[in-house]
Amino acid sequence: MTARGGDGPPTRLSFAEALAAVVAAAEPLPAESVPLMDALGRALADDVASPLDLPPWDNAAMDGYAVRVADVHGASRERPATLRVVGDIAAGGDASAVSLGAGDAARISTGAPVPASADAVVRVEDTEADGARVRVLSDRDVVGDRPQRRNVRPRGEDVRAGATVLERGTTIGAAAIGVLASVGRASVPVTRRPRVAIVSSGDELARVDAFDAVLAGRRIVSSNSYALTAHAWAAGADATDCGFVRDDAGALRSLLATVLARGFDAIVTSGGVSVGLHDHTRDALLALGAELRFWRVRMRPGGPFGFGVVHWGDRRVPWLGLPGNPVSALVTFELFGRPLLRRMGGHRRAFRRAVSVRVGEPVRVGATLTHFLRVTLDHDDDGHLVARLTGPQGSNLLTSMARAEALLVVPEGVQDVPAGATLHAILLGDDALDAERPPA
C-alpha cells in the first residue's frame, strides 16, 4: 500500500481502506496549557479529577423552609403545622449558626446549605408566612418511603472528591467549561491545534479581491482556498491559506518546500491530483521525499484523491491531495481531512455521526463506487428522518454542498435505491442538527 518514489500502488482503494490509512497516520500533537475560556472546542489532553465533592455541602433544591419531618407530618390546609421561624439562610450563607429544635423552621433559598438539624425542605408554595411564624399547609414533601432529606441535594451527589470528571480526548464544550470551572481549573491542558497549510493549484485561479478578472471571463475565484481554510478551522485546526500556484511542476514544488520549511503539521492541496497533462502535485510531492500511500479511491465525488506522508527533517507531515472540483474537494476533506485533523488535535470523537434515514426519491448510481450524495433532512408524518437530494449532484456544483445537511451514503455494489429505502447519512456540522421550527 505504500510507495516512495516510483509509480506507487496501481489499484484504487475502497473508501473504508482509504479512511483507515488516513486515520492510522494521525498522531496526536503535544499538549499545552491554555486559560479556561480559550479551551472551548479544544481536546482535553489529560484526565481531570475533582479536588472536592460537588456539591460541596447539602443544599436546598428549592426555596422554602428547612424543617424537621416530625413537626410537619400530617400537615394540611385544614390542619396546618405552625412553626417558629428561627433563621434565614441565603445561598452562600452559614447554616452552622442555625439549629432547629422541636417546632422550629428556617427560611431557606435554593442552593443554600441545609442545617444538620433539618430533615427536609418544605417548598414555599406549601406555606403561609405569618411574621415570625410559618404555617405548613401540606406534608407532601415529607411522606412516602424516604421522607428524610426530601428536597435536599446531598453533598457529593454529582461528583465525589478524587473522581474523574472529564476524560482525556473530551471535546470541551460549554458544559465541560462549567465543569472545569467548578473544580477550580483556571487553566486547562489541551492538545495543540494542528497547523495546516492550504494550497491550491491552477492557471485559472484568482483571489476574490481580483474579481474583475473573473467578470472579464479569464479567471475563476479560488473558492477551494477559502472553503478549505474555513473547513479546517471548523475542524479545530489552525489553518493558513498559503495561496495558489500555477500549473507548473517547479513552481508547485517550490511553494510546497516553503510550506514544509514553515513547520506546518499537515498540508492540504487541491487540484493537480488527476491524470491530466497539467496535474503535477504527485510528482512535486515525490520530489520532496513524500511517501505516497494512495491516490485513487473508489468513491464519488472525490475519486482522484491522494494521501501520503512527507518526511521533512525529523518530522512526518501528512499530505491530503484533494481534487480541484469544489464539491469533490469539500467532500474528501469532510470524509478524510476532518478525521485526520481531529485525531491530530487529540479529539476522541473524530468522526461525524451517521444516522439512519429513509430515501425520499429513487436514486440510481454506478455500482462500482461508494457514492456520497448531498441531501437535506426532514421528518415525515410518521417521524422518520427523510433524505432528499439537494438537486443535481455534479462535482462542480458548489451550491449543492452549501445547501446540504448530510451526505447520503450509497455503498459500493448498489446501483438502484428505491424511494423509501433505508440508508445511512453522515451529518454535516452543527447546522444539520438545527431546525427551522421548534420541537413539537
Image (cartoon, grey):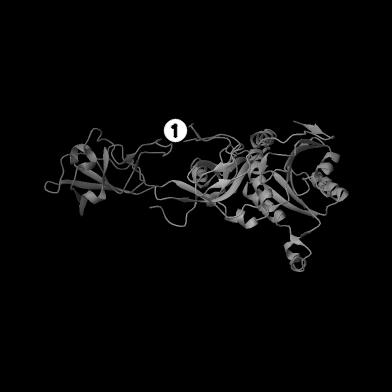
- Tell whether 92 sits left or right of 10: left
Is 245 located above or below residue 320 in the figure? below
Residue type at mark 1 is Arg
Query: On the image, which quarter does residue 55 sit in?
Result: top left
Q: Quadrant of residue 151?
A: top left
Q: Residue at x 56, y 34 (%)?
A: 47
Quadrant of the rendered image containing residue 307: top right
**Closer-to-camera residue (40/15):** 15
21 on left or right of 132 = right
Q: Residue 248: give x, y in percent of width and height.
A: 86, 51
Measuring from the top left, give residue 5's x and y in whole percent: 84, 35
Along the viewing direction, whichever of 341 and 15 lies nearer the viewer: 15
The image position of residue 219, as x and y in percent, is 77, 62
Relative to 211, say whether 34 is above or below. Answer: above
Q: Is residue 203 visible?
A: yes
Left or right: 81 as drawn, with respect to 116 = left
> Residue reaching furthest right?
250
Residue count near mark 1 (Cα–Cα under 10 Å), binned few <14, some 14–19, many ≥20: some
> Circle 1 sits in a helix, a strand or a loop, which is it?
loop
